[in-house]
Image: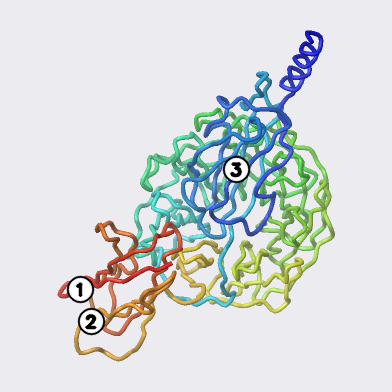
Amino acid sequence: ICIFAFCILIITGAVYAQAPLVTAVSPQRQVINADRSSQIIATFNTAIDPTTINNLTFRVFAKLSGPVNGSFEFLNGNTQVKFTPALPFLAGEWITVSLSKGIRSQGNVAMEKGFVWQFWSKAGTGTLQQSLIKSIPVRRQGEGHIQCYGALGMDFNNDRLTDLAIVNEISKDFRVYLNNGVNFDTMHSIYSLPAGNFPSPSEAADFNHDGKVDIVIGNAGNNIMSLFIASGNAVFQPEVPHTAANNVRGVAVGDIDGDGDDDIVTANRGGSNISIFKNNGNGTFAAAVNINTVGNGETAVMLTDANNDGILDAFIGCYSSREIVLLLGDGNGSFTFSARSDIIGSPWAIAVGDINGDGYPDVAAALSSYNRIGVVFGNGSGGLSAVTTYNTIGTFPLAIDIGDLDGDNDLDLIASNYSGGNFNVYNNTGSGVFSNTPHTLPSSSSGSCITVHDRDNDGDLDLAGIDEIDDILFIFNNGVTGINPASQEIPESFNLHQNFPNPFNPNTKINYDIVTKGKVVLKVFDILGNEVQTLVNEVQEPGKYSAEFSASSGNNYLPSGVYYYRLDTDVYSETKSMILLK
């Protein structure tokens, strides 16, 4: 018996002495339609020490909503770690789960390398032919050309609404527009880049682990990477410049060395290389390490796991050599060449995701002067296919973006045509094949970039476009407009109508009449008087209007019960009740 017990002890000790390895994940890597209330599970080959699991070693970051808070559970003898987010993900956002080398087994053995996987939250049913509902000048009154190019969509003030940070090349600044739940009315703030020159590419991360969303911006006119650390509530500290190589055209963020914090990679067209900035763990960064790839004129960079080893790899768009280069990460913060694909045209921007539904990340590129977009498929083991190209309706596509716009569980593409004055939306058939006759959305003079996000939190993905010649922000709506002029008829009196249907589940319409031009606010409250959602908050002309309220969009997973909606103008106020019945 003693010998048997001794053998069991030896076997158990040997199991616990293993370095933890991730053997399975949920949601699956690269899946397009994970439930927005998904729990995140990592399964290991050995029991994990629960004291080593925290929001630094097991991090979840969503591309639109930022750092994700939640709680941990330990299952199956501590071989599984389950993370339950405190709130549902926003619709159609790209989610990154990063596990660090700080995770240890019950035998006190650390992970040898970090582990990262990514997936998309489910987007609701929508349309590719979206409606232009508003045009917003980005220039201040009396201001000249500022050349707004990059537009970063992110919840900067933690209200579960996607805001915009618009980067401007000539004025050397970025401007924050806060989302009021329906639209973007006025500029919230402006931040200068004193060390910058022609800033444009931008990304977001929580670099110093304070739960706030920071911003990194590349400068195409010099060799500076500009870092802005958030103070909270959409306020940022002054620029902290870092030296890369010349002409920083692309930026990407991710934990490339598995130490639990996000690093930065820049693509430098003039330097013909990439720069790696390792995070010191507190939002400060070591000096750049420059790597020469096999390509020339590195202009765009995206990080994702291309060969299913849980380590971030780098897709590089090389403008001068007209190719996509794939570099595999080593888990310690460096990269080695794996594959290249000739894409015929010069890539100005790239986007990544599982385009053909095989579970492996692919890359799409805007091919600038070639007047086409290109798609290259990854094979899941570090290889790349030949390119397939598609026509643009317009010329010089310089940006490309990705998302499931119609909610059919595949990734569609949006190209911005600089010389064509429009945006092209390409429908994915589900197998990574696109039409050569895309849907066209209007710009004024120049289609420059698109942000894909659920602006009104109705569950489908909307678009926000930038025109860098006229400095205009274009707001496009997917599906039924949140606020519709129901009639051009001018009513005789103010009126707030009973919602229809009532009772409702989960959507209902609220009609109201406005007699004189002025500020209009329409809000929904629960039975205790707590504000649930602002449906309208803007100046409106006289007319009859209709607003839609959803009890299951954004942060509004509401229980059955009585709710109130109130209309306020300068001269009129009225409240009515409605019943949510599930």
Pointer 3 or 1: first along the chain:
3
Which residue bears the numbered disc 1?
Answer: 574
Q: Is residue 455 above or below residue 548?
A: above
Instruction: Say whether marks 1 and 2 touch (CB < 8 Å).
Output: yes
- Report whether 580 appears left or right of 381: left
Q: Residues within 10 Å of mark 1 (few under 14, many from 20)?
A: some
Q: Residues within 10 Å of mark 3 (few under 14, many from 20)?
A: many
Q: Is residue 279 above or below residue 153?
A: above
Image quadrant occupied by the N terminus: top right
Which residue bears the numbered disc 3?
Answer: 253
Pointer 3 or 2: first along the chain:
3
Nearest the eye: 295 or 113: 113
Three-letter amino acid code of the residue under disc 3: Val
Q: Quadrant of residue 435?
A: bottom right
Q: Is residue 384 above or below residue 500?
A: above
Which residue bears the numbered disc 2?
Answer: 495
Nearest the eye: 189 or 297: 189
- Report whether 411 appears left or right of 123: right
